[in-house]
Amino acid sequence: MTDRGIEYHVLTKSGDASAEIEEAVKALGTRENAGLHRYYYVKRANQTVVMASGVDSPIARVLRERAGWKEPRGQE
């Protein structure tokens, strides 16, 4: 996914995972240290979308280890 011409790694989870993301970021220090660009809860789809700085960013590694998180195909 791109935002303002910059490519980001995307992770998704069903439901509103905002609290889970905030907890993970707090454990990692700051949004910048976590590699978190932004996240959204899409109410109509009942899905949380995370935009991370890269596939190996700290937030991506943490969420990948937790239940329910998925990475859309086609991301390298």
Image: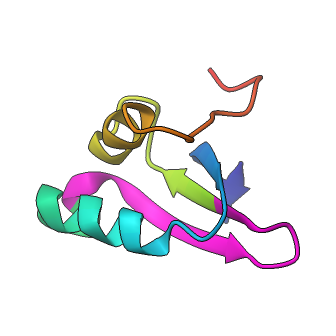
Does residue 27 appear left or right of residue 6 in this picture?
Answer: left
Q: Residue at x 66, y 64 (%)?
A: 15
Residue 46, located in which quarter of the rendered image?
bottom right
Front residue (pair 20, 58)? 20
Q: How many marks?
A: 0
Q: Which residues are magenta?
A: 33-48
Query: Where, quadrant-wise, is the C terminus in this rendering?
Result: top right
Identified at 70% across, 53% down, the residue is: 2
The quarter of the picture where residue 22 lies is: bottom left
- Residue 18 location, x and y as percent? 48, 73
Q: x, y percentage for residue 53?
A: 44, 47
Q: Is residue 52 left or right of residue 6?
A: left
The vertical placement of 63 against 26, above or below, is: above
Residue at 63%, 51% (x, y): give it: 13
Queried whether the magenta region covers residue 29, the answer comes back as no
Specify whether 20 is left or right of 39: left
Q: Can residue 5 be seen here?
A: no
